[in-house]
């Protein structure tokens, strides 16, 4: 149940190249020992305003937690959406990821808005898909065999696209309907595999030897990992500014009366 909230500090190690489909328990330690120092929090007023408050990542992905830690959001409530991702894959990749990420954000936000431990200051949700050169949205691999088969297909097609939608929500201080502000974006990255990628190299990749399959990318690497950081940062600023703008608008209206 979503009411069983676990408060988890994000790991700070650099993110791997691909997102796992496994759901990790939110109280499982995922950070490994590292000689690298954790990144210093970004000194931005809008980020400072939500530090120490209830910021929810509506995803169990450790990669997304690691990325958010890079901008100083390391103290997160990890509350994945439990609603099945059932949108038809006949949708365009843009619409598919946007609708899925919006559903995740809305589901978690509505479940937590009257939570005993307080309403969220911010909810961040995302969805990432891999798309073949023919425009087919590929299923997330459920096993090592599926993953190998998918990578072989992507290798043979040389290049493919990765789409990530990010949706950010925050409650409004005013009573303005619907009671929340929401902002979203969809990012696209083209990934090109090397022409000399062998079956053995794919197996090595599956076993964890880095991003050795990729020849180059066109777009954001963060997007391939599962959370484009720069656009996400802009969304957080915008959704918090939406609330400030409405508060100012109400104050001006009251003064006029």
Image (cartoon, rainbow, N blue to C red):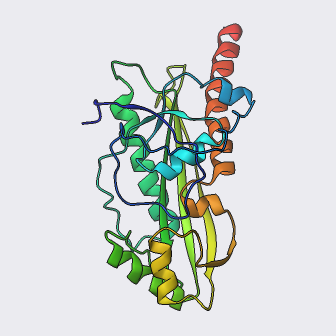
* x then y, percent, for residue 235: 63, 43
Please state, as top left, top right, bottom left or bottom right, where the C terminus lies in the image: top right
Give the answer, above or below, for where 173 lies relative to 256.
Answer: below
* x then y, percent, for residue 166: 54, 51
Q: Would you say 212 lies left or right of 116 here? A: right
Please state, as top left, top right, bottom left or bottom right, where the N terminus lies in the image: top left
Residue 108: which quarter of the image? top left
Residue found at x 29% / y 55%: 84
Residue 243: which quarter of the image? top right
Give the answer, above or below, for where 40 lies relative to 227.
Answer: above
Residue found at x 58% / y 87%: 158
Residue 134 appears in view = no
Q: Residue furthest right?
A: 43
As rendered, which of 150 and 187 lies closer to the eye?
Answer: 150
Residue 174: which quarter of the image? top right
Q: Would you say 2 lies left or right of 54 here? A: left
* x then y, percent, for residue 182: 54, 39
As rendered, which of 47 and 72 lies closer to the eye?
Answer: 72
């Amino acid at each position: 149940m979503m009411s069983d909230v676990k408060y988890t500090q994000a790991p700070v190690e650099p993110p791997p190249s691909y997102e796992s489909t496994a759901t990790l328990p939110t109280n499982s330690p995922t950070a490994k020992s590292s000689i690298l120092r954790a990144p210093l929090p970004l000194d931005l007023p809008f980020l400072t305003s939500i530090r120490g408050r209830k910021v929810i990542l509506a995803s169990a992905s450790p990669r997304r937690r690691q990325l958010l830690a890079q901008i100083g959001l390391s103290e997160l409530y990890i509350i994945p959406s439990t609603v099945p991702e059932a949108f038809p894959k006949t949708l365009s990749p843009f619409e598919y990821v946007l609708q899925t990420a919006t559903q995740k954000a809305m589901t978690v936000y509505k479940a937590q808005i009257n939570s005993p431990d307080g309403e969220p200051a911010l909810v961040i949700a995302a969805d990432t898909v891999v798309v073949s050169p023919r425009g087919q949205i590929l299923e997330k691999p459920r096993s090592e065999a599926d993953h190998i088969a998918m990578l072989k297909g992507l290798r043979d097609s040389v290049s493919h696209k990765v789409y990530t939608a990010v949706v950010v929500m925050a409650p409004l201080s005013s009573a303005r309907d619907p009671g929340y502000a929401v902002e979203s974006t969809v990012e696209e990255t083209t990934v090109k595999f090397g022409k000399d990628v062998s079956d053995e190299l794919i197996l090595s990749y599956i076993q964890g030897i880095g991003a050795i399959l990729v020849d180059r990318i066109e777009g954001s690497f963060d997007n391939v990992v599962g959370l484009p950081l720069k656009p996400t940062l802009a969304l957080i600023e915008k959704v918090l500014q939406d609330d400030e703008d409405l508060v100012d608008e109400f104050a001006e209206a009251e003064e006029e009366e």
